Amino acid sequence: GQQVMQIPQYQHVQEGEDFTTYCNSSTTLSNIQWYKQRPGGHPVFLIQLVKSGEVKKQKRLTFQFGEAKKNSSLHITATQTTDVGTYFCAGRVNGGSQGNLIFGKGTKLSVKP
Amino acid sequence: DAGVIQSPRHEVTEMGQEVTLRCKPISGHNSLFWYRQTMMRGLELLIYFNNNVPIDDSGMPEDRFSAKMPNASFSTLKIQPSEPRDSAVYFCASSLRTDTQYFGPGTRLTVL
């Protein structure tokens, strides 16, 4: 079936280091969303990318959508302890059921102060 | 707006018992989603509704699970009979058309 693969599964960094998580789909996506889930919390929407090659920034976070609309990445510059949590990508497949997002398994980020 | 409301927040039950999880979506949203999250399987979509109609229930594990949405402001997910492997956090989310999904705080279910 349709899958969205996300790597790495875990990432441990020292505060101040950069962090990147990657998302790959087996099929072309119409758009991709990123969510963050703090420990013990619920997923919270961060951003949506729609266009091929799109790049969006939110302060220290940079989101990219691949040219083929099959992959995406989230890069955090100079991590802080507040960045701790699990980052999920979620893709909507072309021609897929409206409203149905396919979530990756997430990358769990821990930041050592 | 209060956001998506789920109840109960925690549920501990014994194997074989019926469990009902409740969700109130954000007012005006027309899509509602039920997810299950476990360490092993991550976040899984169980079922989603559009305008109160179930659109895709292919993620529902088996006949023990059922979901209803009798009106635009309420949905239930029922497990009968419950089993220990059903232990997980169950999230409800709502959205407007195909926009951002807003997740509720979740129900942590433990089946002994």
Image (cartoon, grey):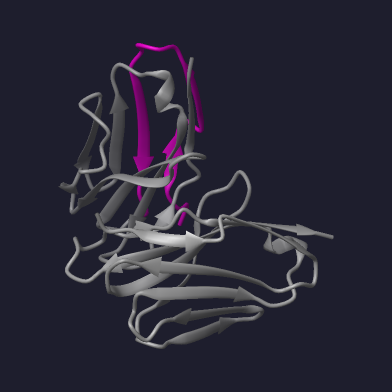
Q: Quadrant of the N terminus of chain A?
A: bottom left
The residue lying toward the viewer, choosing from B40 and A58, is B40
Magenta-colored stretch includes residue B10: yes
Q: Is residue A107 left or right of residue A47?
A: right
B19 to A43, vertically: above or below:
above
Q: Is residue A60 left or right of residue B50?
A: right
Magenta-colored stretch includes residue B9: yes
Residue B10: percent from left, percent from top: 52, 28
B4 to B68, vertically: above or below:
below
The residue lying toward the viewer, choosing from A35 and A1, is A1
Q: Is residue B85 left or right of residue A14?
A: left
Q: Quadrant of the C terminus of chain A?
A: bottom right
Q: Which residues are magenta?
A: B1-26
Residue B48: percent from left, percent from top: 25, 48
Q: Is residue A47 left or right of residue B30?
A: right
Task: Please report the residue visible at 29 percent of the width from the left and 73 percent of the height from the top.
Answer: A29
Task: Please report the residue visible at 48 percent of the width from the left and 39 percent of the height from the top.
Answer: B40
Q: Specify the quadrant of the image occupied by residue A11.
A: bottom right
For the image, the number of numbered tags is 0
Task: Please report the residue visible at 34 percent of the width from the left and 54 percent of the height from the top.
Answer: B94
B59 to B29, vertically: above or below:
above
Residue B90: percent from left, percent from top: 42, 38
A102 to B41, vertically: above or below:
below
Residue B57: percent from left, percent from top: 20, 43
